[in-house]
Amino acid sequence: MVTERPFLITHELSFIFEGRLHVLEDVSLTIAAGAFVALVGPSGVGKSTLLRLLGGLLPATGGEALLQGQPPHLHGSPIGIVFQRDGLMPWRTVWDNVALPLELQGVQKGEGNGRIQAVLDLVGLSDFIHSYPAQLSGGMAQRVSIARALVHEPALLLLDEPFGALDALTRERMGQELLRIWEAMPVTVFMVTHSIMEAVLLADEVMVMNGEPAAGKPARITARIPISLPRPRHLHMQATADFQQHAAAVRQAIAGV
Ligand SMILES: Nc1ncnc2c1ncn2[C@@H]1O[C@H](COP(=O)(O)OP(=O)(O)OP(=O)(O)O)[C@@H](O)[C@H]1O
Ligand SMILES: [Mg+2]
C-alpha cells in the first residue's frame, strides 16, 4: 500500500570507491512508504553500490541517505536484504537459518518461534523446516533467504538480483510470490534486477541508472518511469500493449535514447 509520506530519500548521494573510482554521483531519489521500486541499469554501473548505501552497509562519500529521517545504519528498525546467492548457512536447517537474524538481535530462543513460523508459512516452506539448504531447489533456497530477511519485520526490503540465479520459469513464479508477500506485509521494496520484464511486471516505479564508472563516468539515476499497470499484476499482462509500452520506455531509458 503506497502512501505519500516520504519513507526513503537520498540527497545528492555520491560514492567514491577507495578514493579513486567515482561510482555514483548526485543520486537524489524519494521512495514512498509501501512502494515497490525496481532499479535497472547496465552491468557494473553501480546498482549494488546504491543498494548497499541504502542499507547502511556502505558509508556515502557525499550527500546522504535517510530512512524515515535517519541514516540507514542508525535507524532503529532492521532492514531486510537478499542477495543473488542465497547466502544460507549449509549446516543449519531451514528453520535455524530463518531464526538467525533473531539470534543476532538477542531474541531469546523460543520467543521468536511465532514469527519464524509465520514467515515460513508466508513463503510456503512450512513443510521443509527440518531440511538443509543442500536439499532445496534454487527457488526454495531463495524463499528461505526472503523469509530470513523478513523475520525481523523490516520496514525496508532490499533485493539485489534475488532471482538472477534461477531458471526462467522459477524466476517468473518467484516474482509472483514476491508480489503476494509484498501485498501481505507493510514493507517497502527496493529491487535491483537485470530483467526489464520483471521490473515492469512487479514495480510501481522503475528507476534507470546509467553511466560507466570504470571509464570515468559516474552513474546517476537518469530516468524514473512510473508503471501505471493495474494491480493485481499477472504474468499474462506481459502480452498487453500497455505493458509493452512500459517495457519499451525502460529499454530506451537504459540505452539512453
Ligand atoms: N569491492 C570492489 N572492488 C573494486 N571495484 C568495485 C568493488 N565494488 C564495486 N566496484 C566497482 O564499482 C562499480 C559499480 O559496481 P556495482 O557492483 O555497484 O555495479 P552493478 O551495477 O551492481 O553491476 P552488476 O549488474 O554487474 O551487479 C563497478 O565499476 C565495480 O567494478
Ligand atoms: Mg550488482
Image: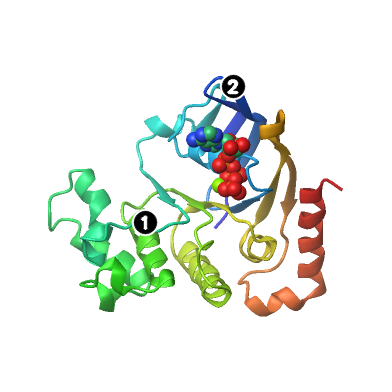
Direction from residue 251 to residue 136 in the image, left or right: left
Disc 1 under 8 Å from ligand 2? The reply is: no
Residue 143 position, x and y percent, is: 39, 66
- Amino acid bearing label 2: Arg
- In the current view of this chain or complex, which residue is farthest to the left? 109
Circles 1, 2 touching at the beta carbon (< 8 Å)? no
Q: In percent of the image, x 56 and y 77: which residue is there?
A: 169
Badge count: 2
Within-10-Å neighbours for mark 1: few <14, some 14–19, many 20+: many
Question: Which label was assigned to residue 20?
Answer: 2
Asked if residue 243 is positioned above or below residue 75 in the image, the reply reads below
Secondary structure beneath disc 2? loop
Say which quarter of the image contains residue 199: bottom right
* Kind of residue sitting beneath label 1: Leu
The residue that appears at 65% across and 57% down in the rendered structure is 204
Q: Return the residue at label 1.
A: 150
Which residue is more in the foreground, 172 or 106?
Answer: 172
- Please, is residue 159 above or below residue 119 in the view? above
Task: List x then y, in percent, for residue 146.
Answer: 40, 60
Q: Is residue 54 visible?
A: yes
In the shown orientation, is residue 61 left or right of residue 257?
A: left
